[in-house]
Amino acid sequence: NVTAGSQQELIRGDKSDLREDIVNPHVDNMSILLLGVDTRPGESNGRTDAILVATLNQEEQSIILTSIPRDSRVEIVGRGTLDKINHAHAFGGIDMTIDTVEQLLDIPIDYFARINFQAFVDVVDAIDGVEIEVPFNFEEKDMNNDWIQFTEGIQHLNGEEALAYTRMRKHPQGGGDIGRGQRQQQVLEAIIEKGTSFSSIARFDDVLDAIGENLITNLSFGDLVSLHSYAGNLNNIEQLQLGGTDLMLNGIYYYEVDNESILDIRIQLKQHLDINLTDEEQH
Ligand code: C30
């Protein structure tokens, strides 16, 4: 089994506790937790500032990208406390993050891919950049703290530019962290669509080699190859956001996720994964 990036097994093993059988990425509907961490070269662990769940439906050939705001106040599974969801990664790594996301959305998380800044830059550069519709003029810093200027309109972004675009949070028109989550979805969609344009598996192998330890995943190389061909027949990518409100508690900012929105997203994702709804969800 050829490895992709750095392989990491989960403590729970290959199968989510919410699954009867192991999921085969070549034929089954499945979910992938995509995590972007803010580690700079030489640093370990880091904070999961980008948290997205991708669900894939084989029959429809569709993907839903659900963005989970990093400040969402949820129960951290294994600690039993209400805290920001991105603290799960600091306390218990990917395992605790997956358990927490599974409880929040009530769906199995079958696979994960965690990347840092450098891997993100490498992925985007490996596909020769992405086309992004920039909504307004702004500037943001790159990894070396140099300013990058963004101009409204459809722009071609290289890896460094795409990273700065997905990090931008403080511009008055940018919608804060929620707007940032939408920009991450926008860029991910562009990556997935563009990713289909490089067809050679050898090239794909080079890309993964370059990313090396900056990508940590429990997907095998074969799984990634099958995802790549899946992307080639893709009909539709939909984006969902968790609704909620700002909350200040003891001087700390949280995003209080709206219960109706959670219920609504659970239903949509279960239907997309072809998982039975609970009695409550059916009514
Ligand atoms: C089939 C499919 C769907 C996938 C196949 C699998 C693969 C390989 C997919 C590849 C793509 C993946 C896995 C993507 C993961 C998700 C994404 C979109 C990641 C994006 C980039 C990334 C690696 C991490 C995200 C980093 C983010 C959003 C922010 C970190 C601000 C501080 C205090 C200030 C600071 C200020 C800014 C920009 N910064 O950046 O700078 O730490 O952000 O908000 O914490 O910091 O606030 O005030 O000090 O300057 O304003 P940050 P901050």
Image: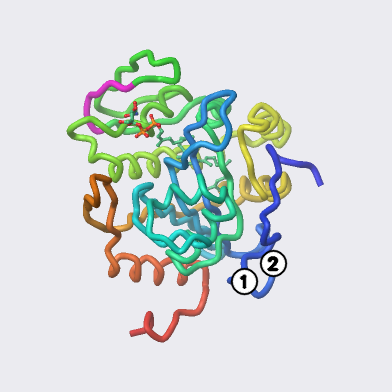
Q: Amino acid at mark 2?
A: Ile
Question: Left of 89 or right of it: where is 243?
Answer: left
Query: For the residue with label 1, is its CB less than 8 Å from the closest atom of ligand 1?
Result: no
Image coordinates of residue 217 in percent, x first then y, are: 64, 45
- Choose top left, top right, bottom left or bottom right for residue 162: top left
**Residue picked out by circle 2:** 22
Image coordinates of residue 118 in percent, x first then y, are: 54, 26
Question: Left of 16 or right of it: where is 250?
Answer: left
- Choose top left, top right, bottom left or bottom right for residue 41: top right
Residue with the most extreme right position: 1
Relative to residue 176, is residue 243 depicted above or below? below
Q: Residue at the location (23% across, 36% down)?
A: 174
> Any magenta on residue 194?
no
Q: Amino acid at mark 1?
A: Arg
Image coordinates of residue 15 in percent, x first then y, are: 67, 64
Taking depth in this image into account, of 196 and 121 the one nearest to the observer is 121
The circle on residue 19 is: 1
Q: Magenta region: which residues? A: 135-140
Taking depth in this image into account, of 95 and 169 the one nearest to the observer is 95
> Any magenta on residue 139?
yes
Taking depth in this image into account, of 177 and 126 the one nearest to the observer is 177
